[in-house]
Amino acid sequence: MQVAQEPRELATNPFPGSAPIPNGAAIPPGPLRVVVNNGGPHSLANPSGITAERAGLSPLDARSPRTKQKRNKPTLSCLECVERKTKCDRARPCIACVKRQSSCQYSPIANLIASADHKTGRDSQARFVTKPLSKIRKTSTASSTTTITSPVTDNGWTTIENRAHRKSMSSNGSSPYLLSNVPYSQSSPSNVFGIGSQHPFSNYWTCQGGLPEVISVMPSKEQADILIARYFEAVDPVYPFIHRRSFYADYERFWSVSLEERGNTDASFVALHYAMYALGTQFMPFPSYEERSQTAEFYCSAANQALRVYSYLNRTSMRAIQAMLLMAYFLMNDNHASDAYAWAGIHLRQAYAMRLHRDPDIVTPDASVLEKQQRRKLWQAVFHHDTFLTVLLKLPPTATHSDVPVESLADEHELSLDGLDTCLDTHSRVENLMSINVIAPQACEPLRPALPHHIVDPATMKSDVAFMRSMWHLGNLVQENFSSPSSLSLPLANSPRHKDSLVLAFKRLYKSFPAHLTTLDHTILQQQAAQHPRATRQNLFLTSNYYHCLMLLHAAENEPAGVEANIKSALEAAHEAIWAFFKLWALYESEAGVWWVFQHRAFEEALLIAHLLAVPPPMPMPMPQGVGVGEGGVGVGFDAVYVQAKEDVARMLEIMDRNFRYGGSLEMHRTRKEVLKEAFERIVI
């Protein structure tokens, strides 16, 4: 994504024939901003850019103090920056006012000029930021002196007690729904999100063991086959960035050689092995949650050790980034969201270093069609992980710069056989120049004959690419309109019209997705699960992500700008979002109990529903025939949407009571349940 250049001004008089700028005129301090077609602001030796001769003054007049004269050009900077004499980028609000948390207002003529520029399209590339709510800021200061009664922060959403007032507890450094029990006040190091306090990778390794030590603890070939098959069954459908045919070719070659020869294998591929074993183990049935967790954590520790042998901080490859990305998902499922977020920062920077964010037709024109396609798919996976994780954590997105066209992830590229007979990442490696791979590159071996489970049929390949394109388009919309403003605790909409346009943009995008990815009927999904389980999993993940964001958008408020929450629409979107989790639970219960992202979205949806239902609807509805009677025998009727929403929260609580499938007796799950029960008791429906 290219960052738009802001309009820049010359400090000299822009209006020919008008009076010259006097020496005493107010000129914003700082580097001179020069009007150029490309490039940024440049600091010059003379910051003002004006000499006495150019200003029409004699040297004596230039030295003598003069009374300030009125500027002969309109003031386009905000009033606060003019008063403080600070640099203003003229956004609405400007970044300076955002940082100092002050009111950002412009003169009528400045607003008129900005409006004219917007209509003519001259600022179509400009940066606009939603104005922060002063009420949020004030409440934040006041709340720091009060007693915290709930372990969940509010992040500007409707509070249970009074929907007209909000509070922000972002000062504690935690994400609001990751359930840090108290704000941090101590100066000692603290966990970022309040969960997963132990180091994620236990140390089983010696200093001199190297890669042979890591390989020596691999499971048997029969066990490895089961774990890899489970990975491709449960994980690959929703994150299909590994090319199965080329992976299995390398996999079978690895197991066909002797143990001594395996020690010469690329360490990044060994790391990928173990990362897939770890995720496959998470989705295997075990007698207890603890036993499954310990086994999976051992495999992930081995993956980490293989990456250390590989020197993953100063070199990288597609195999290494694939392994690191899978390890990030493993850490999230293993109750280490803090570690997953930090770990993702490494593989994202390595993806940038390998230029995955660039169009492969530009940066690797000589690469095969297969390698180019794998670069696109891996960047989409990195982008997807970063975008939707930051939505949940309310933190800034990082995968923000890319020129890879979404539509370049095309069917014909996926179906092409060009590149199957070459090394997959020949052009996609960042190597230490003294490494053996640079000094003596290894020749690629021809592919072995494929077994039936090594091959993906063309229909499935096309379906996978359609799913990835859909998630990519959705991610672009979410990153711009959710991740960035949420990370600064800014409202999502700066006017009712802006909110309506965002809702329309999301709905228009959803209608463009393939029909099999947008089916909501449970009966149809049950039939599809029997015939096309892969497409069913993709449908549920897309539905969950889309309706979760639509729910947040409908619930968004911005009181100073007149933006109100659409409670009924928010409840309807929340119903579809949380029912995606219920459907996953009904169709694939063991998988629903593992996916942290799915569980956490469902928890947020249930909690927001409970918050919204804590305030009575504005107008009571006539009670339908057969509905219960309130206190004193008086009929109390509510819209079916409200009744349905309460049932959704009750169903979520019922699922959370199933200890093993939903995460055992982990503290985070117990805290989630306690928080949701407390919110459920305050529902007035």
Image (cartoon, helix red, strand yellow):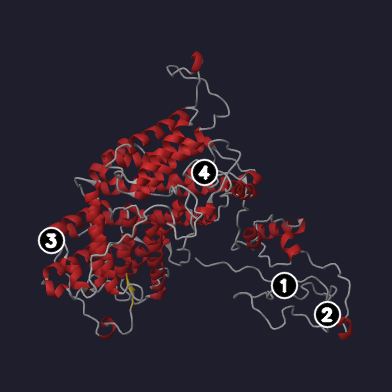
Amino acid type for the residue under numbered disc 2: Ala
Q: Left or right? Give the position of 274 relative to 33.
A: left
> In this view of the protein, can residue 517 be seen by the observer?
no
**Would you call the spot at circle 2 few (<14 residues within 10 Å), some (14-19), or many (20 or more)?**
some
Q: CA distance from mark 1 to mark 4?
A: 44 Å
Amino acid type for the residue under numbered disc 3: Ser
Could you tell me which residue is drawn at 58 percent across and 43 percent down? Answer: 166
Query: Is the Cβ of the residue at disc 3 closer than 8 Å to that at disc 1?
Result: no
Q: Which residue has dot 3 on it?
A: 220
Q: Which-is-in-front pick, marks 1 and 2?
A: 1
Q: CA distance from mark 3 to mark 1?
A: 69 Å
Q: CA distance from mark 2 to mark 4?
A: 61 Å
The answer to which image quadrant residue 208 occupies is bottom left
Could you tell me which residue is drawn at 24 percent across and 49 percent down? Answer: 290
Q: Which-is-in-front pick, marks 1 and 4?
A: 4
Secondary structure beneath label 1: loop
**Would you call the spot at circle 4 few (<14 residues within 10 Å), some (14-19), or many (20 or more)?**
some
Could you tell me which residue is drawn at 39 percent across and 69 percent down? Answer: 351
Closer to the chain start, of discs 3 and 4, is 4
Q: Which residue has dot 2 on it?
A: 55
Amino acid type for the residue under numbered disc 1: Pro
Q: Which residue has dot 4 on it?
A: 148
- Compared to residue 458, the image places residue 148 above or below, namely above
